[in-house]
Image (tube, rainbow, N blue to C red):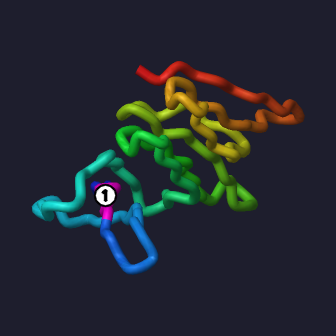
């Protein structure tokens, strides 16, 4: 079963200052004045969001999705990076999401087999 998840950014001013909250919801019709939808992600029942980051301009989001499935004798875990509506190729591990200070590049680390990679991609 595929489920749509809406990542929403909510900004609220409290006595401690501006509070920014990113939350996931499966309800499509929410449209509050102080929040906006950053991304719509489709997840299967085997997938979950394990990390999420928003750039300093609060207009771009990157997500790490973990998928766990049973293989022949053990559980197999793969990771994907979701950004700008696109899902990356599967990795053995993905983490350490970071936007550049100007918000124009996204960097993250991956493991494929026995190799560790740092990946940097331009943000449109």
Relative to 121, residue 30 above or below: below
- Can residue 1 be seen here? no
Q: Which corner quadrant of the image does residue 74 belong to?
A: bottom right
Q: Which image quarter: residue 20? A: bottom left
Q: Nearer the viewer, residue 45 or 110?
A: 110
Instruction: Examine the rendered structure and indicate whether residue 52 appears above or below residue 81.
Output: below
Instruction: Please name the residue shown 42% across and 70% down the image.
Output: 17
Determine the residue located farthest toward the right in the rendered image.
Answer: 114
Up the image or down, 10 lies above or below 105; here it is below
Quadrant the C terminus occupies: top left
Residue at 63 percent of width and 43 percent of height = 97
From the image, tell me which residue sits under label 1: 8
- Is residue 10 one of those drawn in magenta? yes
Query: Does the image show residue 114?
Result: yes
Residue at 45% across, 35% down: 83
The image position of residue 104, as x and y in percent, is 51, 24
The image shows residue 4 at horizontal and vertical percentages of 28, 55
Q: State the extent of the magenta-drawn residues as a range.
A: 6-11
- Residue at image position (47%, 47%) is 54
Residue 114 drawn at (x, y percent): 89, 35
Q: Nearer the viewer, residue 45 or 52?
A: 52
């Amino acid at each position: 079963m595929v489920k749509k998840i809406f990542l929403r950014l909510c900004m609220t001013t409290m006595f401690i200052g501006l509070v920014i909250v990113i939350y996931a919801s499966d309800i499509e019709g929410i449209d509050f004045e102080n929040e906006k939808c950053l991304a719509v992600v489709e997840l299967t029942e085997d997938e979950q969001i394990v990390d999420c980051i928003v750039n300093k301009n609060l207009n771009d989001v990157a997500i790490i999705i973990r998928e766990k499935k049973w293989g022949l004798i053990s559980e197999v875990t793969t990771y994907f990076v979701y950004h700008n509506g696109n899902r990356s190729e599967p990795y053995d591990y993905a983490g350490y999401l970071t936007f550049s200070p100007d918000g124009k590049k996204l960097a993250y680390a991956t493991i494929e087999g026995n190799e560790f990679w740092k990946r940097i991609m331009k943000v449109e």
